[in-house]
Amino acid sequence: MNQKPPFTAIFTSPVGYLGICLEGQKLIGLKFLGRGNPSVDVVAEESSGMNKAVNSALNDYFINPQHVVQPEIMLDGTEYQRKIWKALTQIRSGETRTYGDIARELKTSPRAVGNACRRNPVPIFIPCHRVVSKSGGGGFMGHTTGEPLAIKKWLLVHEQEAAADD
């Protein structure tokens, strides 16, 4: 039986529900759950201050992605994945880079960059949506069509519009 992970909180966003996972005072997971009613378990923790920090950061992002205070994050990934995720955080809101650009910078392959993006535990805060293919949008959350790609496009347009207003 494939059990869905419990979330500390559910956040309602313009692109649908987001499941938030905390460990202590650190964000360890953020998952796009879609627009439908999320049928997931929510386990409230006593880290309500962190819930507020994550909610505040997400609210800030959806109001103006140019001015977001990032919450504390604890990443569970290989050293290699963390290296790629760190490179993704250097892509400014409103900008994009290709998988190939990042691969050349880190002396790896575009496929490896894509695999690390797919395993990104905290999208938005590690902006894998800002990574595109040289011939188009690329994928998002392991998909190249459907709702995940629509979310990626929405996030990119949202950031580009905010950058143009700043």
Image (tube, rainbow, N blue to C red):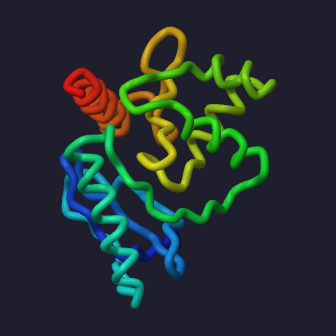
State the residue lying farthest toward the front: 166
Residue 61 location in percent, x, y?
A: 29, 47
**Residue at the image point whose x is 66% and y is 62% from the top:** 76
State the residue lying farthest toward the top: 135
**Residue at the image point whose x is 45% and y is 62% from the top:** 71
**Residue at the image point whose x is 57% and y is 42% from the top:** 118
State the residue in front, 12 or 26.
26
**Placement of the C terminus among the 4 image quadrants:** top left
Whether 30 is drawn above or below 46: the answer is above
State the residue in front, 86 or 23.
86
Q: Quadrant of residue 165?
A: top left
Residue 70 location in percent, x, y?
A: 44, 55
Whether 115 is drawn above or below 40: the answer is above
Count of numbered marks: 0
Q: In which quarter of the image is residue 19?
A: bottom left
Residue 111 location in percent, x, y?
A: 68, 27
Indicate left or right for 111 with 68 as reference. Answer: right
**Residue at the image point whose x is 35% and y is 86% from the top:** 44
